[in-house]
Amino acid sequence: MSEAQRFEEEHDIFKRQGSTGPSFKYEWEEMLMHVVLRVYQHGVPESQKEFVSELQEWFIRRSKDGEAPDERSIRRRISPIWQALREDA
């Protein structure tokens, strides 16, 4: 084995890095768990606007820097849930 080959092996020069999948700025999966618990414990909010505001506040409380997704992003994620909940209400 040549010195170059040993160096390459020692330092993993050609090792492929595995992808860990997409990283998201916000905790969308945790938000979904919060939605389930919120509806179970307190029922469906009066309006989708109220629901979006609650979720925005939830993100702010959990954020280290007080950031939250914009209303449109939250609405886009919860619209199918909101529609299904309103159909059953």
Image (cartoon, rainbow, N blue to C red):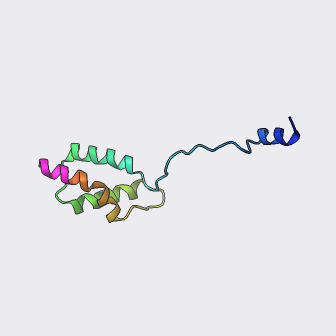
Residue at the image position 29 percent from the left and 58 percent from the top: 54
Q: Residue furthest left?
A: 89
In depth, the one of 58 and 85 nearer the eye is 85
**Horizontal and vertical percent for residue 35?**
28, 48
Q: Is residue 17 left or right of residue 41?
A: right
Above or below: residue 43 compared with residue 54? above
Residue at the image position 16 percent from the left and 57 percent from the top: 46
- On whether residue 54 falls in the magenta region, the answer is no
In depth, the one of 12 and 41 nearer the eye is 12
Q: Residue furthest right?
A: 3
Q: Is residue 10 left or right of residue 16?
A: right
Q: Residue furthest front?
A: 1
**Start-end of magenta stretch:** 83-89
Residue at the image position 27 percent from the left and 44 percent from the top: 36
Q: Main secondary structure of the magenta part?
A: helix
**Horizontal and vertical percent for residue 84?**
19, 49
Indicate the quadrant where residue 61 lies.
bottom left
Q: Is residue 44 visible?
A: no
Indicate the quadrant where residue 57 lies.
bottom left
